[in-house]
Image: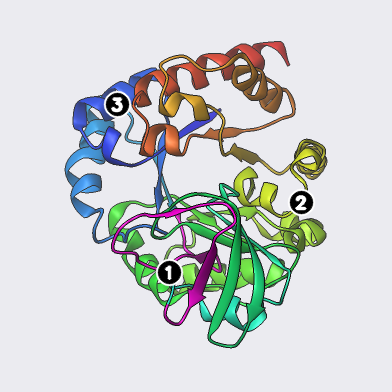
Amino acid sequence: MEFYATLGDPCAKRDILEQLFQAGMTGVRVNLSHTSLKQCAPLLQELYWPAARRVGREDAHLILDLQGPELRVGDLPRPIPLKEGEELLLGEGGIPIPQSILRTARRDQKISIDDGALLLQVKRSSPSVLLCRVLRGGPLLSKKSLSLLGTEVDTPTLTPSDLDNLAQAGRFGVTHILQPFVRGRRDIHTLRETLDRLGLDRVLIMAKIEEAQGLAHLDEILEAADQICIARGDLGNSMPLWKLPAIQKDIARRCREAGKPFCLVTQLLWSMEQRPVPTRAEVCDIYNGVLDGASSLMLTGETAAGRWPVQAMGYLVKTAREAANAR
C-alpha cells in the first residue's frame, strides 16, 4: 500500500520528513490551492528529496493536487468571525468569491464553505453581489473551499495557475497528479493531453470524485483515469452527510470490479490535528477502508497543519497493515 502525507509547516523539517518515511510514508501531496510549485521549491529540493534519499526511498511519490475547477474564497486581510443569523455580503464590496458563483447563485440556495464548516443561505442575488445569512458560523479564512449546494457551476478544467504548475512539474520529480472535481472523461483527456505535450506522459492521473457530476459519470472516469481518489470532503458537501458512507462503499466496489486502484482521503485521523492519539472511530474507518480495497491512504490536515504528524502517520500505517493482513 501507499501512504501519503500532505506537506505543510509541521513537516517542513528534514528530520520530521525522515521520521515520516520511517513510520511508513511512501510519498507526499502538495496542495496547490494554497501555494505554487515555485514557492514549494526549497521544501522539495532541499528537504523532501534529500530526506527520501537519506532513508533509501528514492522511489518516493510526489503528488500535485491541482486547483482545477475548485471554487474558493479569495484573499482576506485577516480571519473574519461569522455569527449565526448575521448577514454577509459576497462579491463586490464584501467577501471576494469567484464570478462563476455570483453568476449562478439564486435566492434560498445554500453555500458551503471550508468543507461544510460554515454554511450560508442566499437572501438576495445579483451578477455582482450576494446577500447571505449565516446558518453555521465560525472563522472565515482566505482560500477556503466554496460549494453551491445542489448546483453545478461551469468552470474550466485547468486554471492558468494549473498550467503554470504543470509546466514546472518535470524538474521537481512529480509522479502523480490529483485532478480535483473531475466531471467526466473530457476533464481527464484535457489533463492527459497537457501532460503529453509537456513530456510528462509517465505521470499518473488520480481523478478525485468530489461531486454529483463525477458520480454520475464514474464509469467513463474509471476508464480514463489511472487511479481514483474518493475525496470525502467536498463529496460530503454534495449530499446529506449520512449518505456518504454508502456512496464511498459503492465507489470502492466499482473500482474493485474495474480493477482500478483507489485512494481514500479526508479526515482519516482528523482528531490528531490536536491530539496524539486517534479516536476509535477513526482507526475503524481506516481499517474498513482497507478491507474495501483501498490501495492508498492520504493524510491532509493531520500533517499539513496538525501537531502530531509523525504519530498520525504511524497510526495510519499500522492500522492499514493490520487490515491488509486480514483481507
Coloring basis for residues: rainbow
Please name the amino acid that badge 1 sits on.
Asp
| Secondary structure character of the magenta stretch overall | loop
Picture coordinates of residue 237, whole percent (x, y): 67, 51
Element carrying mark 2: loop
Magenta segment includes 77: yes
Q: Which mark is residue 239?
A: 2
**Would you say 228 lies left or right of 310 here?**
right
The first of marks 3 and 2 along the sequence is 3
Please name the amino acid that badge 3 sits on.
Gly
Element carrying mark 1: helix
- Residue under label 1, please give it: 162
Separation of residues labelled 3 and 2 (CA atoms): 43 Å
Instruction: Check the image and name the residue furthest to the bottom.
Output: 127
Say which of marks 3 and 2 sits in front: 2
Magenta segment includes 105: no
Separation of residues labelled 3 and 1 (CA atoms): 31 Å
Please name the amino acid that badge 2 sits on.
Met
Query: Which residue does the image show at 58% across and 74% down from the upper left?
Result: 131
Q: Nearer the viewer, residue 302 or 223?
A: 302
Label 3: few (<14), some (14–19) or many (≥20) C-alpha neighbours in 10 Å: few
**Would you say 238 lies left or right of 85 here?**
right
Query: Which residue does the image show at 38% across and 52% down from the upper left?
Result: 174
Q: In which quarter of the view is residue 183 placed?
A: bottom right
Say which of marks 3 and 1 sits in front: 1
- Residue under label 3, please give it: 56
Q: Residues at badges 3 and 1 in contact (C-beta under 8 Å)?
A: no
> Compared to 184, does 288 lie above or below?
above
Q: Nearer the viewer, residue 177 or 237?
A: 237
Q: Nearer the viewer, residue 129 or 57?
A: 129
Label 2: few (<14), some (14–19) or many (≥20) C-alpha neighbours in 10 Å: some
Image: magenta residue range:
65-93
